Structures are given as structure tokens and as C-alpha cells.
Image (cartoon, rainbow, N blue to C red):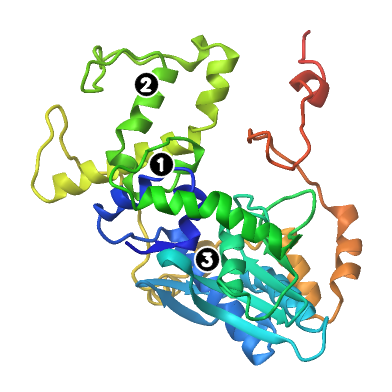
């Protein structure tokens, strides 16, 4: 059973995850994952060819059959990764450089390191591009696995330290989009011996233990996991029979009746519940499409969306009807991010452009709940403190 380094944050905590996931067939990438792969491909080409990402704007490509195009926004985001990779390459003379290097790790674990720079007898730099918005820290298990892939069993490069780097241009973080963690090689090897090796032994054992929690969010086996369902039912105070089925399935408990401790525990797996709900619906719909039926449900036609088959053709037809001024959308000012790109392309450097635009931009930050391990500062003010007293109060 082959394991992927990208799944290590999950399988190091839930040892049953790999075996159960193997029963689910090949994994299918979602749209966000495919977009991330497309962004990685752009970064790889620009690093290898020493090009700017903006040179690829408008280029199109496919990832697992899904079309993507390099937008100015994607080019600017990926350029931040390319710049950091090039900066690391220039730190020392004669570095060993690895780009999208497939690593055969120990004990049947494999993975692909986005970018690595090795200075023999000194240090190994790992640069990992994360195109998503979910915060990932540089000392995550996945990045450590990549470092271990270069160290191997004998540390052939005789590295003394590893510099773990996350480049996450689309995520808001108090430490910025580039975050690095320097750790001694000996500490990394201790982590391997104390955490990784025992987990891999348990995973390949006869009855690996399932441990539900926030790490279940992207698990393939989520829909067949009785432990996560049991955890959800317990937190919602739902009584189940011996088979784990709710005794009163028609009763839907309200989270508002839960105490703060129970609600906090439920929030830690809120993303897991959302993914589980979406997967349940998808499987049920697929089965209906295949001719199966589920008691109490039927398949109906959904809401339709309209689009032009050939926009240029219909535009010509309507223009001949003297409707040219009425058929096109009104021009409107582009977003601040797109105007920033316009200024950059006109020759104005990024810092000057930001300074020029800043007085004209309003920034509204919404509020979201995250685990306390998240490094962003807490916003604990009440609504009244943030927005003032309600009218009429």
C-alpha cells in the first residue's frame, strides 16, 4: 500500500485512513486541486526557463480534462513563489537545485517536492507552493516528509539543517505569504523515529486504529467511516442504536442548545461535516443517475442556467437590429487587484503602485472562526464594539 506525503497530516493521526481509502478506488481531484496543479505547472516552467509568469498570461491548458487559463491574478500569485525560489537559489554558490522532484521516501511513502536547494555539508531548503487559502505551516508533516526524502537513511548530502518553506500567496497570515522554519537534521530524524515510524507500523498492522478529528476533512473514506459519524452524533446528543443508526432520525437537534464546550468540539470538525454532507449528496445523486432508487427521494430537474452558444454570432445578429448600444454590459471600473496589475504592466513598480492606490481603497475584513492553533491574531470584540450601537438603542 503506497502512501503519499500529501496525506501525511491525516494518516499520521488516523492510522486506518490509508486502508479504508484504498477501498474507495482512485481519488478524483476537485476543481481547487486541479487549479493548484495548473499553478504548479506554471511555476515549474518559469523557474526552469527563468521566465516571468506574466509572459504566460492567456495561455491555456488542461488538468485531468478540466480547462484552465493563466490569468493576470494567477501569474502575479505564482510569481511570488518563483521569486522566493530564485532568491534561495542565489544564497550560496554552486547549489544543487531540484524542481518537481519525485521522491521515493522510506517505508513506501512517496511524494513530489516542488522546489529544493541543497548546499552539501550545510543545509537543505524546501520550498512548497500552496495555492489554496487554507493555512499550512512550514513545519507541517508533508514538508517534513520532503526533507526526509532528501536526507534518506544515510544523509548523503551531510546536511546539518533543513529550512522548511511554505509559499502561500492567496492566504492571509500575520507572518506573510512566505513562512520558513529552520530545524536541525537531528531533530527531524528524532521526529521520524518517534512519530513517523510507529505510525507506519500501525498503519501496516492487522487492525489499524481509526481516530476521527479535524484531519478527516479530505479523507476519501469519510463516507464509510463509522467513527466520524459516531463522533458527530455524540456531539449533537443524538441517540443511536447498536448499529450506530439514530433512534429518532426525524429529529434534527439545534446547535443553539449546545453548551460552549460541546459547540467548540463540534466546530473543530465543522469542515469535516460539510465535506461528508456534500459527499453523501454526490453519491446519492450518482446512484439515481445510474438507475438506482432511494426510499423517500426522487430526482427532479434542477434550475437551468442560460449561456450564449456563440457570443460573437448573436452579437452580430442583434447589432443588425440596431441594438448594439443595448446588448453589451456597461463598462465598469476594474477591481483594485486588476488595476494594480494594469499599473505594473505600464512600468510602475509594485510598491509605488500600491502606495498610489492605497488612499483610494476600502478594505473590509469579514470574520471567521478558526482553531486556536491558527497564528492569526484573535478578534474578540463584540459586534457593538466593532460597528457601534444598533440604531434606536
Q: Nearer the viewer, mark 2 or mark 3?
A: 2
Label 3, on which residue? 36
- Of callouts 2 and 3, the N-terminal one: 3
**x and y percent of residue 275 in the render?**
41, 41
75 or 210: nearer the viewer: 210
* In-image side of 58 versus 165 (left or right): left
Rendered residue at 54%/20% (across/down) = 263
| Whether residue 73 is visible | no
Q: Which image quadrant for residue 89?
A: bottom right
Give the SS element for disc 3: helix
Residue that carries the numbered disc 2 in the rendered image: 233
Task: Indicate which disc, 1 or 2, sits on the residue closer to the N terminus.
Answer: 2
In percent of width and height, residue 256 lies at: 52, 13
Q: Is residue 164 above or below residue 123?
A: above
User: Real-space Cα distance between discs 2 and 3?
Assistant: 34 Å
The residue at 32%/61% (across/down) is 1
Q: Which residue is mark 1?
A: 275
Relative side of 339 to 97, left or right: right
The mark that comes first in sequence, 1 or 3, is 3
Instruction: Say if mark 1 contacts mark 3, CB within 8 Å.
Output: no
Q: Quadrant of residue 22?
A: bottom left
Closer-to-camera residue (305/170)? 170
Q: Residues within 10 Å of mark 2 (few under 14, many from 20)?
A: some
CB-based contact (under 8 Å), mark 2 and mark 3: no
**In the drawing, does residue 115 fall left or right of residue 33?**
right
Disc 2 is placed on an element classified as: helix
**Do residues under tags 1 and 2 come within 8 Å of each other at their CB atoms?**
no
The answer to which of 280 and 175 lies nearer the viewer is: 175
* Residue displayed at 31% across by 12% down: 239
Amino acid at each position: 500500500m503506497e502512501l503519499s506525503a500529501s496525506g501525511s497530516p491525516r494518516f499520521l493521526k488516523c492510522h486506518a485512513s490509508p486502508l479504508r481509502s484504498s477501498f474507495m478506488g482512485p481519488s478524483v481531484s476537485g476543481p481547487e486541486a486541479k487549479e493548484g496543479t495548473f499553478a504548479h505547472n506554471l511555476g515549474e516552467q518559469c523557474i526552469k526557463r527563468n521566465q516571468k509568469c506574466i509572459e504566460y498570461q492567456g495561455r491555456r491548458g488542461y488538468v485531468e480534462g478540466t480547462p484552465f487559463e493563466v490569468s493576470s491574478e494567477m501569474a502575479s500569485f505564482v510569481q511570488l513563489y518563483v521569486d522566493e525560489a530564485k532568491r534561495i537559489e542565489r544564497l550560496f554558490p554552486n547549489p544543487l537545485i531540484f524542481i518537481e522532484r519525485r521522491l521515493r521516501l522510506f517505508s513506501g511513502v512517496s511524494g513530489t517536492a516542488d522546489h529544493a536547494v541543497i548546499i552539501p555539508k550545510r543545509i537543505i531548503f524546501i520550498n512548497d507552493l500552496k495555492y489554496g487559502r487554507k493555512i499550512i505551516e512550514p513545519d507541517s508533516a508533508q514538508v517534513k516528509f520532503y526533507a526526509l526524502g532528501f536526507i534518506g537513511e544515510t544523509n548523503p548530502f551531510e546536511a546539518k539543517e533543513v529550512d522548511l518553506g511554505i509559499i502561500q500567496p492567496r492566504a492571509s497570515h500575520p507572518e506573510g505569504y512566505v513562512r520558513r522554519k529552520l530545524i536541525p537534521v537531528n531533530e527531524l530524524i528524532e521526529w521520524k523515529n518517534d512519530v513517523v515510524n510507529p505510525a507506519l507500523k500501525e498503519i501496516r498492522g492487522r487492525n489499524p486504529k481509526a481516530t476521527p478529528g479535524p484531519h478527516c476533512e479530505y479523507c476519501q473514506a469519510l463516507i464509510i467511516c463509522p467513527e466520524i459519524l459516531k463522533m458527530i452524533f455524540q456531539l449533537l446528543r443524538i441517540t443511536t442504536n447498536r448499529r450506530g443508526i439514530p433512534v429518532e432520525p426525524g429529529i434534527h437537534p439545534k446547535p443553539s442548545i449546545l453548551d460552549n464546550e460541546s459547540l467548540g468540539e463540534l466546530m473543530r470538525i465543522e469542515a469535516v461535516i460539510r465535506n461528508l454532507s456534500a459527499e453523501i449528496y454526490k453519491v446519492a445523486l450518482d446512484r439515481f443517475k445510474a438507475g438506482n432508487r432511494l426510499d423517500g427521494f426522487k430526482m427532479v430537474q434542477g434550475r437551468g442556467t442560460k449561456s450564449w452558444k456563440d457570443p460573437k454570432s448573436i452579437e452580430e445578429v442583434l447589432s443588425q437590429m440596431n441594438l448594439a448600444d443595448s446588448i453589451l454590459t456597461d463598462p465598469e471600473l476594474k477591481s483594485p487587484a486588476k488595476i494594480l496589475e494594469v499599473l505594473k504592466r505600464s512600468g510602475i513598480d509594485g510598491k509605488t503602485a500600491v502606495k498610489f492606490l492605497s488612499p483610494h481603497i476600502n478594505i473590509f475584513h469579514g470574520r471567521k472562526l478558526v482553531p486556536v492553533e491558527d497564528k492569526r491574531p484573535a478578534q474578540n470584540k463584540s459586534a457593538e464594539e466593532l460597528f457601534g450601537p444598533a440604531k434606536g438603542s
